[in-house]
Amino acid sequence: MNGGDLGLPVDVPSTALFTDQYELTMLQAALRGGTADRRSVFEVFTRRLPPGRRYGVVAGTGRVLDAVENFRFDPAVLAFLRERDIVDERTADWLADYRFRGSVWGYPEGEVYFPGSPILRVEGSFAECVLLETVVLSILNHDSAIAAAASRMSAAAGGRGLIEMGARRTHELAAVAASRAAYIGGFQSTSDLAAGFRYGIPTVGTSAHAFTLLHDTERDAFQAQVESLGRGTTLLVDTYDVAEAVRTAVEVAGTELGAVRIDSGDLLLVAHRVRQQLDELGAKDTRIVVTSDLDEYAIASLAAAPVDAYGVGTQLVTGSGHPTCSMVYKLVARAESADEGAPLVPVAKKSLGGKLSVGGRKWAARRLDAEGAAEAEVIGTGPVPPELADRQLLVELVRHGEVVGREPLDTARDRHTRARAALPMSALQLSRGEPVIATEYV
Amino acid sequence: MNGGDLGLPVDVPSTALFTDQYELTMLQAALRGGTADRRSVFEVFTRRLPPGRRYGVVAGTGRVLDAVENFRFDPAVLAFLRERDIVDERTADWLADYRFRGSVWGYPEGEVYFPGSPILRVEGSFAECVLLETVVLSILNHDSAIAAAASRMSAAAGGRGLIEMGARRTHELAAVAASRAAYIGGFQSTSDLAAGFRYGIPTVGTSAHAFTLLHDTERDAFQAQVESLGRGTTLLVDTYDVAEAVRTAVEVAGTELGAVRIDSGDLLLVAHRVRQQLDELGAKDTRIVVTSDLDEYAIASLAAAPVDAYGVGTQLVTGSGHPTCSMVYKLVARAESADEGAPLVPVAKKSLGGKLSVGGRKWAARRLDAEGAAEAEVIGTGPVPPELADRQLLVELVRHGEVVGREPLDTARDRHTRARAALPMSALQLSRGEPVIATEYV
């Protein structure tokens, strides 16, 4: 098994412990009580978007498929569960043979979503489905949060370059998944080598302030870099005095200098000055890359500045204020009994505090207006109205335990571009707003 | 090599790709330019705490030690770097033999920190130190953010139980590190089995709403759970009507029922009602566990409620509004030349926008007042004043590439309790404030 499939730059045998203990205790109680085999439907959805956000972006689906495939209990894991008395012998034996044999449908990766959208639907026995809750939610909640931020940033950047460089601001493996999600959301490259290794995302990077400080002079540093990386490299020009650095940079690399990077100061002002200076020095094709705690608002505010590319770190990998989505994994229907063919009954929690859920196995479709723009997210439990039949959103991902929905990352990235473009124009406003289309239940 | 050491429930061969590409291009340029062997000192510090926070908590140090030890370039990784032209042949050969042989000193894990605190100091050749930037920062920035949130929550909870249950709200491996950091910050247990497997943190969990919904009646569900897990289990009582569920729970489990869990509604009100009902039913020892988007403020607001334990998810694993710290890894001193014994020169970026750094290799000590309470974080580059000699904060972690600072997780957890207790009382106020002691440079 190639655990690279788990989003790691390494082999990993199993995802089975990315699980909350209560999933195993529920399994044990259901096995004993005779309800474990009741056919069940679980759905992933959010009750709301993060405050002010106009759409959500599905990301992580591909990683979910890998995680489901690799969800196996090996002897070391089973020994742990037995030693710690987390499950009894019967349950441990059941887990030893576990593999998911049910079906999964869901929104394809890169698609947009809205409150109530059934982003993922997992069907099978209660026992086999209940175990997947935590790992499915971990992946979708994290990756979709990053992709949503990335999408807003790429909308703000227009056609300019976007480099993901947030690895240092988040967990080392979350960073790899964040690069992947950022790419789906419209970023072009990453500084994170593990993301390049694992997902083939283009990697970039040249030098930090430390490299300049290592040398006796800035000129020495630039010379060493250009000798090693060529004139097309990007020189970092804000260690000491920017104007002097730009002059030195062009002296050292010539007018073929690839780019300069500015990592501090008033980027709007400095970018204008640096552009003028580069032009005056004849380095008209030398690009300007800016980095320094950028978010979608800062990117938008630089729209009129002569900036060629943005490097984004902290705010991207922390979801620009919303580091997680509020996706939940809920039982929405289950069979009346464990008998094969027993009819499904819709179920839902009904209690305090407005945490209401809509029971029943759902379909979803996006209704378009006369111009072909998205008009409503239509969700239902009955038959699909004929006019929406070819606008359905869920696709088959896993059939009888077999992954059938795997696709290249670029497919998800392209899908996101298209899905976003089909939303009403106001979707791209960065200001706080309501979901850009309404959710209708039929 | 047991990659469990990396915080994974799995074997992992290397941390070498948790690296930003520019570290390798700087290495290549320095090797070519003859500066790679200059003795260098890098320091990790923050310029500020998150807005309003009164202290920071160092966490992740133990994971950093594992990551440094496992930072090796294996053939698959080297092949990737060559194929993608990320480094030249000479650099790839150098990387093939890489292992860190320098020294690391730092604040021990669980210690508190303030703006400017030299949390970690890495010394060696430029080449060997520059490579560690990203993985060191990823770990410390993530883990310290979670530990800081956990510390505030544990202060708010007083002596009541705190259960980490945020795995579903963050990346599946960030979740494991988050459980570890939460434990250091004062949590007692986790729902995350991978955290139990890897770090021995006590795991807990019984059932979700899905288990109740799976059954024909709530009573059936409670009976199945009690038969499987015993009367000491925790029954979830808010799927339908809380009062009815509590009555059923005590009927099914008797007055020996371990606990009930409430996951929605006005927790203050509901907890009081449930306590009264349990007492009237004779279940005076049955505990009340509350969960439902808690943060330190919600925990504090429940101080007067009859709650025995809090389960905390989203707000914990996202750092309660501050999902990352702003730690940086900066070159602060380097040798005048690559000659052995060449004297160190302090270095620092001096440019736009207030991103000033203090150059030079630093020590740090915490000065106490007459009552033994912390009074100032004292940081210096010269000799340590004699009166501060035994209050120094940095401890040796790696000597000539050998990890010497590994310690059990409980040591870090106990250290945090002591370090926090030594701060002025206002440290524990949850309201927004300034760092509770000032940083003085001498």
Image: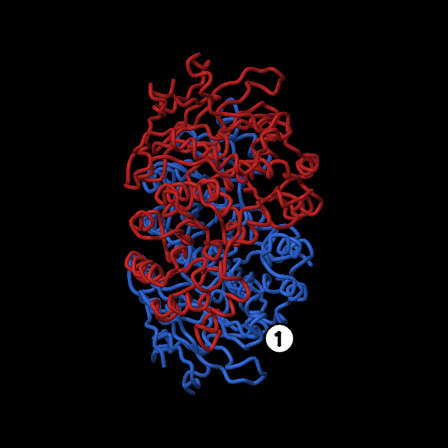
Chain colours: A red, B blue
Q: Nearer the viewer, residue B389 or B30?
A: B30
Residue B221, given in percent of the width and then of the height, sits at 52, 29
Residue under label 1, please give it.
Answer: B400
Q: Quadrant of residue A420?
A: top left
Horizontal and vertical percent position of residue B312 = 43, 47
Which quadrant of the figure contains the C terminus of chain A?
top left
Residue A128, by quadrant, is top right
Count of numbered circles in the view: 1
At 45% across and 83% down in the image, what residue appears?
B389
Crowdedness of circle 1 by 10 Å Cα count: few (<14), some, many (20+)? few
Q: Determine whether the residue tagged by mark 1 lies in a helix, strand or loop.
A: loop
* Residue type indicated by callout 1: His
Q: Choose top left, top right, bottom left or bottom right for residue A437.
A: top left
Query: Which residue is nearer to you in this view: B160 or B152?
Result: B152
What is the x, y in percent for residue B409?
A: 55, 61
Quarter of the image for the N terminus of chain A: give it. Answer: top right
- As drawn, A29 above or below B297: above
